[in-house]
Image: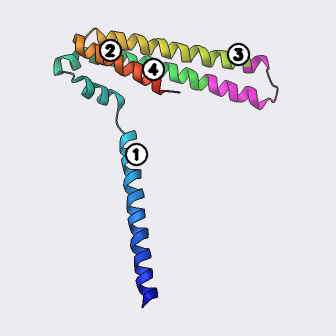
Amino acid sequence: MKHIAGFFIAVIAIAALSSFCTMRWIEARHAAAVDPHEWLHSELKITPEQHQALEPIETKFAEKNRQLKEQMRAANHELAVAIGKGQSNSPEISAAIGKIHLHMGELQNASIDHIFEMRAKLTPEQGATLLRLAQQALDDSP
């Protein structure tokens, strides 16, 4: 009888642990699925009028972001090919790294320009919040 009770207690403990882990996993997936722009608009309490004014700015940035990320992917591919040739510090590796850094810098500049372009359409309080959130994001990133 003691073995049966121990078995059921172990099953209940495993089920509870499994449930806990599953809930944590679901929460983590949900947090990762949040659209950053939707979150930002929620944090800033964007009005419908502001949303309409920000839409062309968002569209322009989304296209620039897409282009620059595609250029970075291409440069990463060039780097992969250069590495595949097996020569350390080759001109091809240096050129690919230079392209990656160039596009990363362009993306950073585009992001900063985007923040200040958005800020121009916000109230002073919203603008201050936007800058604070941008500062936090930079401080929290690697």
Q: Give the dominant element type of the magenta stretch: helix, strand or loop.
A: helix
Distance from the alpha carbon under mark 4 to that under mark 1: 26 Å
Residues marked 4 and 3 touching at CB (< 8 Å): no
The tag earlier along the polypeptide, 2 or 1, is: 1
Q: Which residue is mark 1?
A: 28
Distance from the alpha carbon under mark 2 to that under mark 1: 30 Å
Q: How many marks?
A: 4
Q: x%, y% of residue 87?
A: 82, 26
Distance from the alpha carbon under mark 1 to that under mark 3: 38 Å
Distance from the alpha carbon under mark 2 to that under mark 4: 12 Å
Residue 116 drawn above or below residue 20? above
Residues marked 1 and 3 touching at CB (< 8 Å): no
Residue 31 drawn above or below residue 24? above
Q: Quadrant of residue 88?
A: top right
For the point 41% across and 70% down, the residue is: 13
Amino acid type for the residue under numbered disc 2: Ile
Residue 141 visible, this orientation: yes
Q: Nearer the viewer, mark 1 or mark 3?
A: 1
Q: Residues within 10 Å of mark 1 (few under 14, many from 20)?
A: few
Q: Residues within 10 Å of mark 4 (few under 14, many from 20)?
A: some
* Disc on res. 131: none
Q: Which residue is mark 4?
A: 65
Q: Is residue 68 left or right of residue 101?
A: left
Amino acid type for the residue under numbered disc 3: Ala
The tag earlier along the polypeptide, 4 or 3, is: 4
Of helix, strand and loop, which one carries label 4? Answer: helix
Q: Which residue is mark 3?
A: 95
Distance from the alpha carbon under mark 2 to that under mark 3: 33 Å
Looking at the rendering, the stretch of residues picked out in magenta corresponds to 75-93
For the point 59% across and 13% down, the residue is: 102
Distance from the alpha carbon under mark 4 to that under mark 3: 22 Å
Q: Which residue is mark 2?
A: 57
